[in-house]
Amino acid sequence: MAACSFRRSIASQLSKILDLPPENLIKSISAVPVSKKRLIPADFQLSIDSITEDSSSDHSAQDLQLRAQMLAEKLKCDAVVTEISTGPGTVNFMINRELLAKTVLQQVLKDGSEYGIKSELFSTVPRQKTVIEFSSPNIAKKFHIGHLRSTIIGNFIANLKVALGHQVTRINYLGDWGMQFGLLGVGFQQFGNNEKLKSSPLQHLFEVYVQINKAAEDENTKKLAKDFFRKLEEHDEQTLSLWKQFRSFSIEEYIRIYKRLGVHFDEYSGESFYQEKSQEVLKMLEEKGLLQKTIFGLQLLQCFLSKCRKGTGIVDLSEKKDLSSFSTVMRSDGTSLYITRDLAAAIDRMNKHNCDTMMYVTDKSQSNHFQHLFQILKLMGYDWAERCQHVSFGLVQGMKTRRGEVIFLEDVLDEARSRMLQNMASAKTTKEIENPLETAEKIGLAALIIQDFQGLLSSDYQFSWDRALQSRGDTGVFLQYTHARLHSLEQMHGNEQLTDVNVACLQEPEAISVLQHLLRYDEVLYRSSQDMQPKHIVSYLLTLSHLAAVAHKTLLVKGSAPELAQARLCLFQAARLVLANGMKLLGITPVTQM
């Protein structure tokens, strides 16, 4: 990694003066972010605060500045560093310009898709086994837009972990059990159509569910639904056969839709898998003395306040064991609840995969549920509960299609594609492209992902089609446009593998800005890998696209002397490669024409 060799060189000089091992200094030396507006006369900086031993005490800005100046005076320029200066509490290093161009471009072209990932910043990070549960829609219910967020966030985390050498199992835990299947079964017996179930299962089951729901308060319907679900739990052949059809046809359709998203799963699991195992969990809770039945006194009062019925099974989670915090794990009739099935699923997964971390990607309204889940696992004596993590995200407001409310994920994908097709048709720059539908789909998806990933995942945000699909500005469309433009530049000039190029001639400020920015890629990946936030990569790629756009305007390839044209082409190829790598991590397929 280009940045690594420069960091090491700076660290080895600093270690002699500071009497610290070079490896202790490497993470304190960071590449200086490039601003769109101004040029920075430094490539790396050392923060004095990060190497001060008594960093717990607050140092005044004046004190840090003085220390920076004293350290800078002891340092010398060499073949790598050509200029040393100080900033507010920092020592700044400028790298030899020819060496910068040569090292960065050689490294990008040599490492290809592994550029940034091979960095020594990741050398101390252990390779782990991770199970990620994400997407997890409910069969027969609306594919809530929160499921889209869960799908793209889970996919990003899985992509990033796989790229960094971790072993990842992607699980889709379907809502395929529970009382709603009693209602759905009765509904299908009354309003169902086998042909429609085969051709569009999600749509048809949803329509049936809406119809039967109108009669859900009717005592007879309630009784029929309860009977259907009881038969399902007792494994009645006919009832089970119908349920299996609902499930398998729905999964087939989901797989097709996930394919459009570029998402795959290693396992399709579901609540139904754990219906029996959840009874074992209740038995374990009882044996460990954790399961309490709500019968009298304070228990009854506490449960009355939380609408808990007599005879319900609960686990006391309070520190003082006063039921100030508890979780309901069993209905009064002895059947399991959602959390009981989740406990069974977690135990089963850990036994099966023996993973280092288990992640659940759902919206923040479920934070309480996962807090309880992890607490109960810990009380049961499972120390690995510490390694379970809830990756929560905020809600999306205002996601509507032209026809109105979003009911299915496919509505969103179709809408993004059709709006993008319309924009492409009306754009003057659009050339005749081979597969406009497929291209519009990939660009539309990039627009959705970038709008979603720009802020903190935990933040709610207001969705806007117009903002998402703008071709200029900080959008997924702009990233795709930049990639396609750089790709066609390579096509136009032979598309050959560039070797033995004299890149020393890349000295223009626009070229230096792109090179400085490419230096930072490993730090950005490291930051995202630490906090699982895609926004660092998004912001990096948008800046890269803006810098590449400026360079493309000023650093002409056509009409330049052959040596200069080759060097510039090499710069643009490196920028496109890093742009493509980052986009793929986010779950975006780069387009080559638009």
Image (cartoon, rainbow, N blue to C red):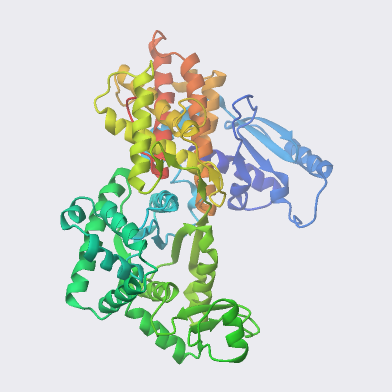
Q: Furthest residue to the top?
A: 559
The quarter in which the C terminus is drawn is: top left
Please name the residue shown 50% across and 40% down the image.
463
* Left-right relation of 311 to 496: right
Q: Compared with residue 287, is residue 541 higher up or lower down, i.e. above or below? A: above
Which is more toward the observer, 330 or 65?
330
Location of residue 442 (image quadrant):
top left
- Residue 333 x, y percent position in the rendering: 40, 85
Please name the residue shown 39% across and 76% down the image.
344
Q: Compared with residue 217, is residue 521 higher up or lower down, i.e. above or below? A: above
Please name the residue shown 48% across and 90% down the image.
288
* Left-right relation of 208 to 515: left
Q: Compared with residue 288, is residue 395 higher up or lower down, i.e. above or below? A: above
- Residue 506 x, y percent position in the rendering: 49, 20
Whether residue 79 appears in this view of the structure is: yes
* Left-right relation of 307 to 447: right
Please name the residue shown 48% across and 67% down the image.
388
- Residue 234 x, y percent position in the rendering: 25, 81
- Residue 5 x, y percent position in the rendering: 52, 40
Q: How many marks?
A: 0
Which is more toward the observer, 193 or 157?
193
